[in-house]
Amino acid sequence: MAHYILKRLLSLVITLLVATIIIFLIIEVVPGDPAAYMMGLSGSSEAADALRIELGLDKGALERYFSWVGGMLSGDFGISYTYRVPVSQLIGERTLVSVPLTVYALILSTLIAVPVGVISASRRGSIVDTSLMGMAQVGVAIPNFWFAILMVLVFSTSLGWFSAVGFPGWDAGFWPCIKALTIPAVSLALPQAAILARVMRSSVLEVMQEDYIRTARAKGLSRRQALIRHGLRNAMIPVLTILGLQFSFLLAGGIIIESIFSLPGLGRLVFQSIAQRDLIVVKSIVTLLVLAVVLITFLVDLIYVLVDPRLREEGRG
Amino acid sequence: MSLLEIQDLSLSIHGTTILEKVNLSIEKGQVVAIVGESGSGKSMTSSAVIRLLPEGTVTSGAIWLNDENISEKSEKEMCAVRANEIGMVFQEPMTALNPVETIGAQVMEAIRISEPGLGRAEVRERAELALHRVGLDNQRFPLNTYPHKLSGGQRQRVVIAIAISQNPALLIADEPTTALDVTAQAKIMTLLKKLVDQDKMGLLLISHDLAVVADIADHIVIMKDGQVVEQGPREGFFENMKHEYTKMLFAAAHHKLQQKFVVEETDPVLEIRGLSKDYKIGRKEKLQAVNDVSFTIGRGENIGLVGESGCGKSTLTRCILGLEDFQKGEILIAGQKFNGERRLRRHINVVFQDPYGSFNPRHKVGRLVAEPYYALDDPPNEDEKKQKVVEMLEHVGLSASDIDKYPHEFSGGQRQRIAIARALITEPDIILLDEATSALDVLIRDQILELLARLTSVFGISYLFVSHDLTTVKNITDRVLVMKDGVIVEEGITAEVYQNPRHPYTKALLEASPDITKSKINNKEQLNDNIFQH
Amino acid sequence: MKHLPLSFIVGGILTLTFTLVAILSFIWTPYDVEAINIAGKFAMPGLDHLMGTDHFGRDIFSMVMVGTRNAIAVSLVAVGIGMILGVPLGLWAAGSRMNGGSLIDEILMRGNDLVFAFPSLLMAIMITAVFGPGAINAIIAIGIFNIPVFARMTRGGALSIWTRDYIMAARVAGKGNMRISYEHILPNILNILIVQATIQFSIAIIAEASLSYVGLGTQPPNPSLGRMLNEAQTMIFFAPWLAYFPGGVIVAMVLGLNLMGDGLRDMLDPKLKKRKASDVTA
């Protein structure tokens, strides 16, 4: 088991390393002169020169790369060009919105999808199954940003329940914040839940065909008991993978959703930074998001070990 | 009344008739075996008793268990019947256990369902006892063992433990040993017999192999196309067979071909010299799959290579076919060193076990059979190829019109004929038969073996029969090699080896292999010795 | 194919309709999509304008037609890139793994994992932002993320085919890696690849819409469904039809493709067929 985890950790580090190289190449090397790019058309040449020095462009690419990665390792992400504050400070504030939003959406998505998938599978072919899966089909097809626009339309205009946009900040207390995050989280979660429900259903159906379910039935368990006691844990294995992938999808999905709902999160920040050509912020946030994805993948691998004893053996994986 | 009484059981799935008026009964402590080929409805009969049937199944007739008509019970009541009165063992032990739960948990669950009132410690004790009774002692196989740590035979024992832990009156075993090696098969059969005797259970044993059940059955039922064609007590059953089908099955079970006389010395078509092959497993460990193997096959000679799974025979086969590298030794084909060279490939070909996986489903027979021509530097033109394919199809008992059909249009036996045609097309010196008849029903197997024998005389081809099945090899080979742990442990004229095995492993194999002509197991002492091994 | 699955019929009709509309838009639209008519702005959907007009008085129906065409074009090329590069990569990885070269396989698959580590939408936004917005860069950005999807699927399918006996038979005949991959492997995994392609197509349509929505896809004045939604957003309170129609079209198009993919899978999946057969004989 230690071997398996070590191997996963190693591949995690390598992935991160290569990812930083790719990000660095895309942002600092390929465009030619990042300073000129960041200044846009309006910048004077003196200003561009000043920026070049600030970015350290007078140094070689290799040196710049190492000082960037080294800086990140010590928590120094540089100074934002547009906001003139440390990027780490910007990110810190924004993370407190984005991460709760993503986690909220992921929890919602799971809470909806797992029961729907199980119910659908255990009543395969019934009206319940057909209508749930029909809804899931439509859910998969809805772009989350369109869904978000419709939600805004429904909740803040027609129903007038609560203001659908904006974020009060955590100082305003826990519940107001959760309230502000609810509609964005639902917008993010529903299309994902539709995908997850379909995966869950087919996974359960597949597992119910397994021989060990028949063994369980021969013991005297009813179909339902066999499903709950022996099917679910096995059916969760492929679902876990999808959950891991969804995390990265939700994080990225936040870019658009946060803009629609005017939430001050990482997604909105990266979007604004791209618009303002603030590459210093862009590369840091992208790196952080990749880190988050890779960590989640690692976490999923660890959960696998807990769920599946076959992975627990030394030298496997 | 009997323990189990099946009366006029008919069954259909989505309108297709599977069973028609099946009648049979089982007494306490009696072993009743249902024997039939695939599609005979034998498994469906047992599934109907425990009522674990596919969707869309309609049954009629009555199933009496302990004087209760269980076919009238509700699904909920059937759960109780399964928990308390019927235990079941399935064919595929590798997948019959939940991979994410310990064997202890799975046995204990069965006990708790059967007797909900028991305390935790008591359930544990009972589970340990059940596992002990099937030969998995708690020192080596504690309750927290996971299934993937166990071999196929050991897993099958766990499944049996689950079944007997509920103290059923009736045990159903559906092809319980088909997926296992011969030695494991013999042990599981002996175990089942012992448990039935001890607990006075009834045992309904399903098998495709008459020889396997002949040893332990008290009563034999022969099924074909959903009907019982013949049944009667084991005592005198084979002496008084009435139905033609039964006689055919019996004949196929101890198949005998015309034996050739001892082959005179001829030039060797295949020579293996000191072949060794190991695999790396993990970081430092090595698995010696094939260890210093040498043998020679002369022209027209039929050799058997026998061993259980994991003995290295598959690796050896792949090396001979030039599909895998090896570390030491050499392979000579037609006197020349062979290590996958294309120009030598025309001299050797192969027929595989699975008639369904042997062909690209998207190609027509004509193209499939002509594939080995690829190895030729000067392949014939399309017309000549086609003519040759037709010729070969006719040799193997198919017709010229089959050339434009797809493989799925043929039955398993026919497909094996196509595979033989493909192997023959370049007129090789030697054909490897890699378990080539193991997946076939007995009657079909018989026909294929006869075909192979005929082709030997037509083409003067040598065969290397690779098989786990000693009975098949016994009757069709001139010489036999016995392989264990990568080493050839015994080699000799087939008849001599079977009569006077020298190596203890060969002896064990022969003892374990089912033989319809052998007498019933009744040596209880020997039984108990064997049970705790493996 | 006597019994086509319902999902395939419904999905096929939807997909065919949008394809025809897209083709039609080349030669005919009710109005010129770039024609501005301020006097006729914010017209409600009606007989003159089936889907109403926007803040410049442009005909939404015409714009949706051309937007559909753009969405299909971008997605088609992007999925094409993914298949053309991903399928050979997957075949290569599987082939080398089955012939002792697991190092190549390992490298290819780790490369795949790497691409999966980047949230795809985020990277697409970054790529189009740095290299300039526009349809071509959107295609490249979406295409890159399709490569590992097809590579992984191809590899998985190929590995299972490689273990079949008929591959052994081909190897015994002396056939090499390339020939086996092309002659025996590819035709037998084409099913799953086609199914996957329809699903990737639908994902690409949503991705294209997302990129256009944030202003990085197809550029004005060329209409795109995503950008129409973005523009509609500020006006939904008094002209909600601006949001209904482009969004509805995206949903219908994606739904059609997914249904068709599901139907195809039911028709082509040998596992399902086998299961049905074994129900009868087991």
Image: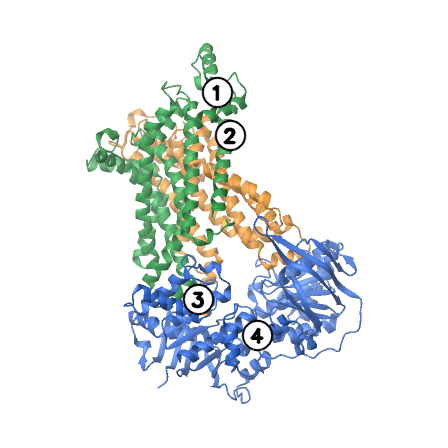
Chain colours: A green, B blue, C orange
Mark 2 Cα-neighbour bin, 10 Å: few <14, some 14–19, many ≥20: some
Q: Is residue C238 left or right of residue B38?
A: left
Mark 3 Cα-neighbour bin, 10 Å: few <14, some 14–19, many ≥20: many
Residue wearing tag 3 = B158
Residue at 33% in and 55% down: A118
Mark 1 Cα-neighbour bin, 10 Å: few <14, some 14–19, many ≥20: many
Asked whether the residues under marks 3 and 2 belong to the same chain, the reply is: no
In the displayed structure, would residue A262 be above or below residue B259? above
Q: Are marks 2 and 4 in contact (CB under 8 Å)?
A: no
Q: Secondary structure at mark 2?
A: helix
Q: As shown in the figure, which amino acid type bears the numbered disc 4?
A: Ala
Residue wearing tag 1 = A34
In the displayed structure, would residue A34 be above or below residue A244? above
Q: Are marks 1 and 3 in contact (CB under 8 Å)?
A: no
Q: As shown in the figure, which amino acid type bears the numbered disc 1?
A: Pro
**Distance of label 3 from label 2 (alpha carbons):** 53 Å
Q: Chain of mark 1?
A: A
Residue wearing tag 4 = B512
Sequence-wise, the earlier of marks 2 and 1 is 2
**Distance of label 3 from label 4 (alpha carbons):** 21 Å
* Residue A244 image point, x, y percent: 40, 43
Q: Secondary structure at mark 1?
A: helix
Asked whether the residues under marks 1 and 4 belong to the same chain, the reply is: no
Marks 3 and 2: which is nearer the front?
3
Q: Which residue occupies the foreground of this view, C18 or A281?
A: A281
Q: As shown in the figure, which amino acid type bears the numbered disc 3?
A: Val
Residue wearing tag 2 = A21
Marks 1 and 4: which is nearer the front?
4
Q: Which residue occupies the foreground of this view, C224 or B471?
A: B471
* Residue B162 image point, x, y percent: 40, 68
**Distance of label 1 from label 4 (alpha carbons):** 78 Å
Q: Chain of mark 2?
A: A
